[in-house]
Image: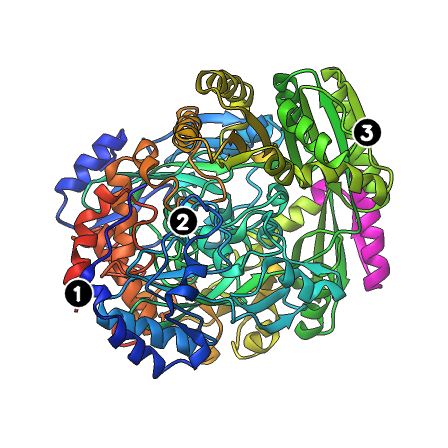
């Protein structure tokens, strides 16, 4: 993975930059000692690391504005960072950048149950947003797997999803407004407590822009009342095809579960060995969860099992209570941990049309043999968001490259069948060089125009999203600034 | 100009130097003086996969054709697009491209999201004639910037849509409506908030005069037993309600809310005001309106006012916006259709329009904040 070479002219400004930042930040908010900046050298895509020139941890929108204005004036690139849980390298530093971490900004600013919204500083973790409204039985719907650690800032940057977005949507569908600080320090309020934009939908394009348009310091989020209850049913099938057909039938029948999770045999085996959840040994397993009152849940689960019967499930286990529900989810929720026990793994994130599921799983199986690397599949089946986990040995020379090539082939396959490279993790550096496989140059040019408007000097989160060859002319301006 | 393909559309715009008025079905009356560019020949459903909840269609496809296909699959466009013909006295067939370009959503917006939330992908031609695609036809997609959202509600000013892909959802087995008389708007808003803050999945919360009495209407949809159960629980919670359990009758109520039927055939200007629901009572009291109708739990106010009055002046600074939906041309020219934006947003929006439409030919001026604002 190529990253731009550190610009010596920018590195030479470090002392001057530190001096200017000291004037606007408390001492503990500025980290310049290389021993300490190393803590920010990577995110959850740990295969790549590069310590930044500096790290700053502002405590307010004003401080963020001051930092960005100074960096803008001095031509220093800035990499925004939430909690550093990106699986795509979205917060990977360059050696000549300032890491701007929002972790200290984690207050709840306003809780408004009548209008069903909460306003938070974006360093707040995803789960603690729900934590702040739980006492009134409300919750914040997007639930990425890393929700205990990941920050709302990163959720907005990557437009994060989760297991329950079949019903509740992803971050962009639950975001009402933001305070955005642009690279030149300008603070902009977009959206608020009302629905729908009065002009161009800038909120819609900021969400998912991977921190390249501005730094979001505050966010107004939609909160929802918790359902009366929720329970899953677990179903095992003889083949991936049959399980895929069952998913399609459930959706068509008019039942809209909150989640439909799919695991294949390698994944079931690993989870079972790790968590001992009592999963049946079969080719494919579905966990389907529905919500409502006890009677509503019974009714929907009844319909689902009725739909599943013609597909001859080898196992059908309805959760009768919270305890059984917990056991059904136990294996699925420990899938990544289970995989980590066996091997190093790379988690992919392509999305495919649900109808292409059997075909894609078959082809991944074939490729697995060709590459000589095992794959386990676990994914959100209702919306076609796949998470193939490729197992490899990081200590074995060449294995990481092999794994990356295999991963790229799987993602290209997703595009070939009408899907996309990433459903919820983002492009970052990981999928950057595959963008031209999904998009034509004119398509990327249109996206880069948006960046030109928000960040004309291309200083924010450099070298992400767009292939370096495509963004070269624009990034060329970088060295000339200041 | 009626291009028959995306390539033709591209050729037309690449050479065009003068403004064009982009028209789908022409039912939403943006009323500008310019040569008309029609999308009607970019028509047809290209893909409909009920099991994947997705539909792809040419931008000029009539809404009626899409709704028919979806009804045959027992599915629907869940964002419930409004039909403007009754309100504006316009004719023609609404197209899916027009709905997307204007981000038109109905009462169910509060529960399932707006049109933009159901838009999975777009193909469009920008003001220079470049053919651009963004998004795709899958439900989760964060590959690159989300121009899909940007195009929804851009009213053609960033490009002319040629194709859209949409998420569709199952039709509900049945629906019912609770009616709740209220003494005043503030009470009505608080009752709607209570209902929307309940676990009973209210899919419509509106308030309007009904047989002379201000009435809150709450819609429940789903399987029959479930609707009955939730209606009972809500009734217990709210008290003094009557229930419309007939599905067709309930549907009629929500069609009328969606299309603001109460204002059909009236004279006067019609404004559409988007606010935080909690601000609705106060804001609406300042409007000096001849008639009012509230949707989205109070977050959407429809106001009928005397011709030529500057409603934005009356409202004063708000968190939200007021759009002039129906008025004579001179009033629209005077006030502008869209709420003027604060300076930093004006700069960003102008920058985007300049880059997507460098010659300023696509519905020029329509979304622009006037310099004197």
In contact (CB < 8 Å): disc 2 and disc 1: no
Q: Nearer the viewer, residue A125 or B346?
A: A125
Q: Chain of mark 1?
A: A
How many C-alpha atoms fall within 10 Å of the one at disc 2: few (<14), some, or many (≥20)? Answer: many
**Which picture quadrant has residue A213?**
bottom left
Are callouts 2 and 3 both on one chain? Answer: no
Residue drawn 75% across and 66% down? Answer: A135
Say which quadrant the N terminus of chain B sits in.
top left
Q: Secondary structure at mark 1?
A: loop
Between marks 2 and 1 in the image, the one whose residue lies nearer the viewer: 1
Which residue position holds label 1? A481
The answer to whether B145 appears left or right of A184 in the picture is right
Q: Chain of mark 2?
A: B
Which residue position holds label 3? A317
Residue drawn 45% across and 31% down? Answer: A396
Residue drawn 53% across and 52% down? Answer: A171
Which residue position holds label 2? B152
Q: Nearer the viewer, residue A278 or A55?
A: A55
- Give x and y (percent) for residue B178: 76, 55
Q: Name which of mark 1 and mark 3 comes first in the sequence.
A: 3
Are callouts 2 and 1 both on one chain? Answer: no
Identify whether B186 is placed above or below B195. Answer: below
Identify whether A289 is placed above or below A480. Answer: above
Identify whether A466 is placed above or below A357. Answer: below
Is B241 inside the magenta-drawn segment?
yes
Question: What span is in magenta?
Answer: B223-249
The answer to whether B331 appears left or right of A240 in the picture is left
Instruction: Give the Cα separation between the discs numbered 2 and 3.
Output: 43 Å
Q: Chain of mark 3?
A: A
The answer to whether A247 appears left or right of B92 in the picture is right
- Give x and y (percent) for residue A52: 35, 60
- Give x and y (percent) for residue B106: 55, 51
């Amino acid at each position: 993975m190529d990253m731009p070479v550190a610009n010596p002219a920018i590195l030479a400004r470090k002392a001057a930059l530190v001096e200017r930042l000291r004037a606007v930040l408390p001492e503990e908010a500025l980290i310049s000692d290389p021993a300490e900046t190393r803590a920010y050298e990577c995110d959850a895509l740990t295969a790549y690391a590069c310590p930044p020139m500096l790290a700053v941890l502002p405590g307010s929108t004003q401080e963020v504005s001051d930092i960005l204005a100074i960096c803008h004036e001095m031509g220093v690139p800035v990499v925004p960072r939430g909690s550093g849980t990106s699986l795509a390298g979205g917060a990977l530093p360059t050696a000549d950048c300032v890491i701007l971490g929002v972790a200290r900004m984690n207050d709840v600013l306003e809780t408004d149950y009548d209008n069903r919204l909460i306003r938070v500083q974006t360093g707040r973790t995803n789960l603690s947003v729900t934590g702040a409204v739980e006492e009134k039985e409300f919750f914040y719907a997007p639930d990425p797997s890393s929700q205990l650690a990941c920050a709302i800032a990163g959720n907005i940057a990557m437009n994060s999803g989760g297991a329950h977005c079949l019903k509740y949507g992803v971050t962009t569908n639950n975001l009402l407004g933001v305070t955005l600080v642009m690279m030149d320090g300008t603070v902009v309020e977009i959206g608020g407590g009302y629905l729908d934009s009065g002009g161009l939908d800038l909120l819609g394009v900021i969400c998912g822009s991977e921190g390249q348009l501005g730094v979001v310091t505050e966010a107004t989020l939609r909160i929802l009342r918790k359902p009366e209850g929720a329970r899953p049913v677990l179903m095992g099938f003889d083949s991936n095809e049959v399980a895929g057909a069952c998913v399609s039938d459930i959706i068509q029948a008019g039942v809209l579960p909150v989640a439909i999770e799919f695991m294949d045999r390698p994944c079931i085996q690993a989870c079972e060995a790790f968590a001992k959840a009592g999963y049946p040994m079969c080719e494919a397993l579905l966990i389907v969860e529905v919500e409502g009152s006890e009677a509503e849940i019974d009714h929907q689960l009844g319909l689902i099992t009725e739909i599943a019967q013609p597909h001859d499930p080898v196992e059908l286990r309805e959760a009768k209570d919270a305890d059984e529900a917990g056991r059904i989810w136990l294996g699925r929720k420990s899938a990544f941990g289970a995989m980590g026990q066996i091997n190093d793994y790379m988690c992919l994130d392509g999305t495919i049309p649900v109808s292409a599921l059997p075909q894609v799983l078959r082809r991944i199986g074939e490729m697995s043999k060709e590459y000589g690397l095992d794959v386990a599949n676990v994914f959100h089946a209702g919306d076609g968001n796949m998470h193939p986990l490729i197992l490899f040995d990081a200590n074995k020379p060449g294995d990481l490259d092999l794994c990356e090539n295999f991963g790229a082939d799987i993602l290209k396959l997703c595009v070939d069948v009408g899907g996309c490279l990433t459903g919820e993790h983002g492009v970052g550096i990981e999928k950057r060089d595959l963008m031209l496989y999904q998009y034509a140059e004119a398509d990327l040019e249109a996206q880069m125009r948006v960046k030109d408007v928000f960040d004309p000097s291309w200083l924010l989160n450099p070298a992400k999203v767009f292939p370096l060859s495509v963004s070269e002319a624009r990034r060329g301006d970088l060295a000339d600034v200041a | 100009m009626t291009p028959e393909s995306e390539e033709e559309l591209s050729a037309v715009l690449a050479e065009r130097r003068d403004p064009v008025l982009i028209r789908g079905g022409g039912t939403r009356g943006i009323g500008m003086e310019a040569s008309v560019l029609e999308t009607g020949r970019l028509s047809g459903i290209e893909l409909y996969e009920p099991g994947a909840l997705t539909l792809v269609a040419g931008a000029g496809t009539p809404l009626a054709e899409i709704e028919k296909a979806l009804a045959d699959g027992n599915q629907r466009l869940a964002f419930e697009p409004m039909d403007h013909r009754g309100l504006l006295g316009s004719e023609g067939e609404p197209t899916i491209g027009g709905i997307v370009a204007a981000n038109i959503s109905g009462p169910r917006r509060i529960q399932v999201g707006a049109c933009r939330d159901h838009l999975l992908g777009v193909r469009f031609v920008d003001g220079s004639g470049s053919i651009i695609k963004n998004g795709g036809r899958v439900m989760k997609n964060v590959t690159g910037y989300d121009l899909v959202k940007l195009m929804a509600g851009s009213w053609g000013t960033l490009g002319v849509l040629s194709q859209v892909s949409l998420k569709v959802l199952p039709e509900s087995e049945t629906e019912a409506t609770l009616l709740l008389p209220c003494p005043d708007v503030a009470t009505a808003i608080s009752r709607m908030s209570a209902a929307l803050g309940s676990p009973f999945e209210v899919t419509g919360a509106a308030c309007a005069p009904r047989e002379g009495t201000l009435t809150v209407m709450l819609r429940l949809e789903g399987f029959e037993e479930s609707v009955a159960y939730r209606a009972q629980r809500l009734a217990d919670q709210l008290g003094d309600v009557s229930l419309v359990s007939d599905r067709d009758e309930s549907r009629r109520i929500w069609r009328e809310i969606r299309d603001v039927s109460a204002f059909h055939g009236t004279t006067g200007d019609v404004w559409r005001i988007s606010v935080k629901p909690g601000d609705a009572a106060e804001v609406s009291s300042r409007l000096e309106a001849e008639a009012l109708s509230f949707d989205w739990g109070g977050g959407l106010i429809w106001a009928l006012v005397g011709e030529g009055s500057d409603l934005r002046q009356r409202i004063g600074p708000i968190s939200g916006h007021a759009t002039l939906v129906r008025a004579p041309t001179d009033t629209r020219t005077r006030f502008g259709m869209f709420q003027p934006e604060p300076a930093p947003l004006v700069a960003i929006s102008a920058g985007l329009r300049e880059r997507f439409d460098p010659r300023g030919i696509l519905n020029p001026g329509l979304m622009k904040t006037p310099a004197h604002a």
